[in-house]
Image (cartoon, grey):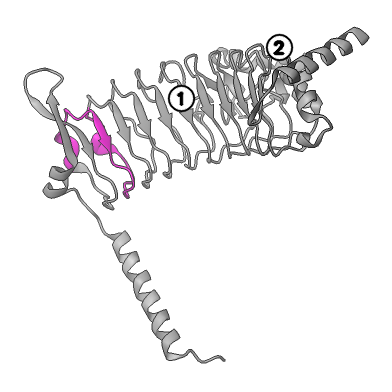
């Protein structure tokens, strides 16, 4: 057995000591004290009721905080940034009814917050440990960032309905869900009125959806396709019929313009249809397994589609790739990083006309 030299032994002992100290530090409860509070409060402004003045912002990052109970009484706070701490929940903030912006990224939060936040417009919970959503009521929420969590589904396991809908977040326009554990699936429970899916969004106001780096494989709803559709739909509750009639596990997003499904393992483009996504303008399919022009042609019915990103898909190796994609998608203006030139557009339009006349 090799003998550890004195210097090596000292280095090893030092590393073990550092690891022990780090473990001890991480196990400590770090509570807001008066000094931290005083240094974190800022932007003194007139209160909502106009009767006095109070700090409107609280910014406290990189303090290893585990307990923010002291913030319960600061009801006039409108902006809170408590990112890069060690918080496991946001319950002490549930009563802060004047909150407009809450940034709590890079913590250890395990539960989706259900605060009484009627004016909340921006909620950043990215880089946490959230495993499931809960139905909430955030009537003014515009931006919800849940990237880099542990979500497997967006639906309620008791009734199969999506937790994010037009009743809970009616004004939501940006939703970040990249780097989670979401898989497209269609599971029927013992109750024939309940369908459990992983996505199933129904948000009329949503403009941008980021689903990259999940495991989607396909967004097609194969169990409810074609001649089986109407027969199968009769089994399910009316709340789910509209969602499933589009043959898409994504759901129904009539005003979505940006869809990012980069690096999700997509094998085909089933379920990405004008019926469920009629207003799509930008589609990022980078780093997937789309292998043929036949799949690209499934996008030909999108009237608003202007930009498609296909970099690092097998279809990029097709002969005359840029030309053939433009022929398949006549409204396209940008492919990958490059905008089509006037000459490219004219060549593609001419070729498309020739092929149309030949048939």
The percent coordinates of residue 48 (x first, y second) are 15, 19
Residue at the farthest left position = 52
Question: In the image, what residue occupies the spot 16% across and 38% down?
Answer: 41
Q: Secondary structure at mark 2?
A: helix
Q: Secondary structure at mark 1?
A: strand
The percent coordinates of residue 104 (x first, y second) are 34, 39
Would residue 341 be visible to someone looking at this image?
Answer: yes
Question: In the image, what residue occupies the spot 65% across and 15% down?
Answer: 246
The numbered mark, 1 or 2, whose residue comes first in the sequence reads 1
Residue at the farthest front position = 343
Magenta stretch, residue numbers: 70-96
Q: Give how far apart the Cα atoms at labels 1 and 2 are.
A: 33 Å
Residue hosting label 1? 174
Residue at the farthest top position = 357
Is residue 59 rendered to the left or right of residue 357? Answer: left
Q: On the rendered image, what quadrant is the N terminus found in?
A: bottom right
Question: In the image, what residue occupies the spot 43% across and 43% down?
Answer: 127
Of residue 56 and residue 66, the one placed in the foreground of this image is 56
Magenta highlight on residue 352:
no
The percent coordinates of residue 90 (x first, y second) are 30, 39
Secondary structure mostly taken by the magenta-highlighted segment of the chain = loop
């Amino acid at each position: 057995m090799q003998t550890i030299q004195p210097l090596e032994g000292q280095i090893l002992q030092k590393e073990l000591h550092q690891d022990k100290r780090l473990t001890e530090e991480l196990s400590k409860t770090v509570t807001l004290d008066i000094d931290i509070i005083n240094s974190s409060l800022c932007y003194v402004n007139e209160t909502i009721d106009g009767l006095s003045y109070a700090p409107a912002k609280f910014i406290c990052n990189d303090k290893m905080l585990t307990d923010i109970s002291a913030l319960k009484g600061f009801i006039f706070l409108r902006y809170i940034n408590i990112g890069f701490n060690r918080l496991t929940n946001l319950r002490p903030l549930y009563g802060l009814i004047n909150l407009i912006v809450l940034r709590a990224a890079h913590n250890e939060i395990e539960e989706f917050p259900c605060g009484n936040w009627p004016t909340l417009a921006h909620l950043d919970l990215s880089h946490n440990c959230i495993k499931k959503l809960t139905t909430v009521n955030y009537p003014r929420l515009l931006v919800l960032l849940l990237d880099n969590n542990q979500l497997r589904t967006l639906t309620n396991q008791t009734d199969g309905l999506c937790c994010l809908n037009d009743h809970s977040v009616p004004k939501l326009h940006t939703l970040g869900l990249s780097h989670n554990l979401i898989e497209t699936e269609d599971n029927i429970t013992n109750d024939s009125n309940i369908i459990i899916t992983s996505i199933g969004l129904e948000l009329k106001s949503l403009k941008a959806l980021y689903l990259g780096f999940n495991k989607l494989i396909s967004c097609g709803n194969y169990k409810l396709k074609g001649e089986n559709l109407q027969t199968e739909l009769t089994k399910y509750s009316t709340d789910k019929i509209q969602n499933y009639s589009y043959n898409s596990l994504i759901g129904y997003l009539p005003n979505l313009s940006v869809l990012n499904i980069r690096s999700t393992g997509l094998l085909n483009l089933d379920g990405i249809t004008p019926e469920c996504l009629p207003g799509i303008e930008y589609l990022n399919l980078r780093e997937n397994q789309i292998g043929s022009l036949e799949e690209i042609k499934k996008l030909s019915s999108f009237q608003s589609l202007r930009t498609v990103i296909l970099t690092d898909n097998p279809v990029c190796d097709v002969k005359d790739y840029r030309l053939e994609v433009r022929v398949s998608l006549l409204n396209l203006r940008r492919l990958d990083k490059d905008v089509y030139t006037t000459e490219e557009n004219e060549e593609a339009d001419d070729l498309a006309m020739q092929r149309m006349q030949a048939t």
